Image (cartoon, rainbow, N blue to C red):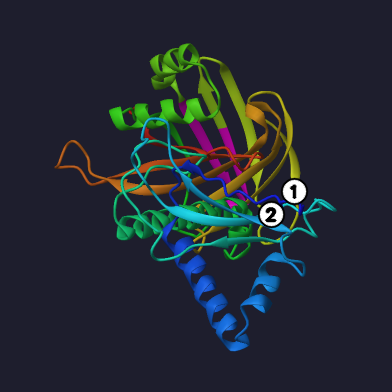
Amino acid sequence: MEEEQPTKKRSRIRRIVTFPYRRIQKLLAKRRAAKAEQQQQQSTTAATELVNGEREGDSKAIPISLQTAEEDTTASSVVEISISDGTETHEEAETESTLEVTESTLEVTEPVDQVNGFSATSSSSEALEEETETETSDADTTAETAAETSASDDNNDNIKKWATAAPSVDLTGDWELLITDEFKREYDDYLRLLDQPAFVRSVALSIVGLTTEETIQKDGGRNLFIRGRNVRGVWERTLSSTGDTEESYIITTADNEQVQAESWWEDAGTKHRSWLRGVSNYGGGSFESLRYLETAPNKDTTEPPRKVLVCESTFHPDDTTREKAHVTWRFQRKQP
């Protein structure tokens, strides 16, 4: 009596998956290319060997459609996957897998849950394409932002640097801080990005109005002496212009840290920029300051416009995944 040959059974596993629209298009293109190749060869056997291996019966075709437990009757994208399961080897390099997607089996509805890391999308292919384009746009924006952050120092190399100030510019003065609601919000956010807790920020905001600054511009701007005062104490330093050289010098910060400093004038000698590099506090980074004068209207309209000292302060974290902290200080001359 002849022994009955065991028959291969086809099993079906159903789950829901939402493929991005463009990926589906690529899979369909591959499917059509495979069909064209089969027609050219005019041999079903040859095509089967090309897909499943040189020996017939080495693999089992397992049609899979994805479906959630909550959405038992909702069909999403149905795909047929042929997975090689040869008994002699399971190495990935020797196993051939074919993902087959046909127009007749693709049914996109409205899955409401997140399945295997794929987020639920809308019911139309246009919505799928829009979501994919949005994700690509977000990725491009993130990449551009990271590139701008990492190239911040490189931008300084493209700026014409001056060792002295323009003849009409003098930052010398005795200054008091201008307080506005906008400044308070910006200053609070600045401290938050420096990892300062809410209590510390609250105290700092209540006393920041006592901040004053005295500046003395010497030697045509080659040296800028700054004496800052607040409740914490007094911080004195002299910023010496290095111009377009690569020179730097040691300076002591308000936190009593020894750091590398460099400074120069730019915008034809009208703005003074300085860098303090190698700061270990606040998670590590560099402080950048840009000082210049701007004209502001006087409260008394009969008087001429007044000069305001602007200081843009930015902390650049060494960790490029962190956000930069920025605040703009504005000082007016002390009243006699």
Task: Inspect this view and state whether residue 105 appears.
Answer: yes
Residue at screen point 55% across, 24% down: 195
Is residue 221 highlighted in magenta?
A: yes
Where in the figure is residue 283, as x and y percent of width and height? 65, 29
Out of 133 and 269, give the one closest to the viewer. Answer: 133
User: Residue 137 lies in magenta, yes or no?
Assistant: no
Q: Amino acid at mark 1?
A: Ser
Furthest residue to the left? 302
Kindly identify which residue carries mark 1.
Answer: 248
Q: Is residue 182 above or below residue 82?
A: above
Q: CA distance from mark 2 to mark 1?
A: 7 Å
Please state the extent of the stretch shown in magenta in the rendering.
212-226
Left or right: 239 as drawn, with respect to 13: right
User: Is 309 positioned to the left or the right of 93 in the image?
Assistant: left
Q: Given the current orientation, which residue lies at the most extreme right position?
A: 88
Residue at image location 63% in from the left, 45% down from the top: 275
In the depicted structure, whether residue 236 falls above or below residue 31: above
